[in-house]
Amino acid sequence: MNKILITGCSGFLASYLIKIFKEQDDNEIYGITEIPDFVSNEFKVFNIDIRERENVLKIIEEIRPDIIFHLAAITNVGFSWKNQKLTYEVNFIGSLNILEAVEKFSSSARLVLMSSAELYGKNQGPVNENSEVSIQNPYSLSKYSMELLGDIFVLSKNLNIIKIRSFNFTGSGQDKKFVCSDFAYQIAQIEKGEKDPVIKVGNLSVKRDFSDVRDIARYLSVISKKGETGKVYNLCSGHSYSIEEILEILLEFSVKKIKIIVDKNKFRPSDIPVLSADCTLLREKFDLYPDIRIEETLLDLLNYWRRSGT
């Protein structure tokens, strides 16, 4: 049995990754989450904050996992601007705790560090894994610091670490603090008559590479087994969309007439105008391509909010 530990197991991406591994017979899954009342009937959950070093050490010692997906993090750029200290504590100190615990109790494990394409900053692209790092916000700074920690542990402690820089992804179940989910949620609320038919938006010209979360989870499951120690890998679709295009696709799925208002207060400091991806390594090394079109992804997301509503 492969012992698989997923930090941030209560999160959006983790739920899809866990589903993939549950469908395989040879995996024993464990999870860490800071949410105190999160439980699961499918795997053992440890409810701790990864900033708590001693608790992290105890859990890694108990499990001694074969594969660790370190997904726990502050993941929202806007939130990171307003909560910089917390972002650095979780994304850097929390990651240091994981790395030290793995070195001490499970040094042969494959450790997958979930980073971000935000590290490429103003390199408009298409960017590949060798493109220059250009830090533009507290979130990307915290993630790059985590990557550098990983490099130190590979070089000095011989840990088996790979780094993942994921571009944007979305899908059913995503928190509405992220742009695609925020739009879908508001449209669903308007359709139910629970909100005036107006959506306030920020900078619609920003362009990002978007993937379906199911594709990203699939990529992760493959790369965790086949990736080379110390390497960084982009997870991407190879297709960039402006935020305006995303909103237009979602609006086409609704019969409601909705007014769009640009709100300057929603603009983020140092917003990166364009971030597009070069997926060559993902294609050539792992033969990984998207299975799900953006229209299907966004319709699934809208239907999720139509069903849940909160």
Image: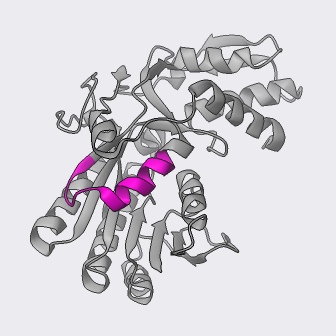
Q: Observer-nearest residue: 297 or 152?
A: 297
The image shows residue 130 at horizontal and vertical percentages of 17, 37
Residue at image point 53% right, 74% down: 29
Could you tell me which quadrant the C terminus lies in? top right
Q: Is residue 240 above or below residue 113?
A: above
Seen from this angle, which residue lies furthest right? 193
Does the magenta stretch mainly form a helix, a strand or a loop? Answer: helix
The image shows residue 258 at horizontal and vertical percentages of 76, 13
Q: Observer-nearest residue: 22 or 200?
A: 22
Q: Is residue 22 above or below residue 227?
A: below
Picture quadrant of residue 133? top left
Q: Observer-nearest residue: 151 or 235?
A: 235
Residue at image point 79% right, 17% down: 197
Residue at image point 41% right, 76% down: 52
The image shows residue 163 at horizontal and vertical percentages of 28, 53
> Is 206 placed left or right of 140 in the picture?
right
Provide the residue span drawn in magenta.
Answer: 216-232
> Is 125 placed left or right of 20 in the picture?
left
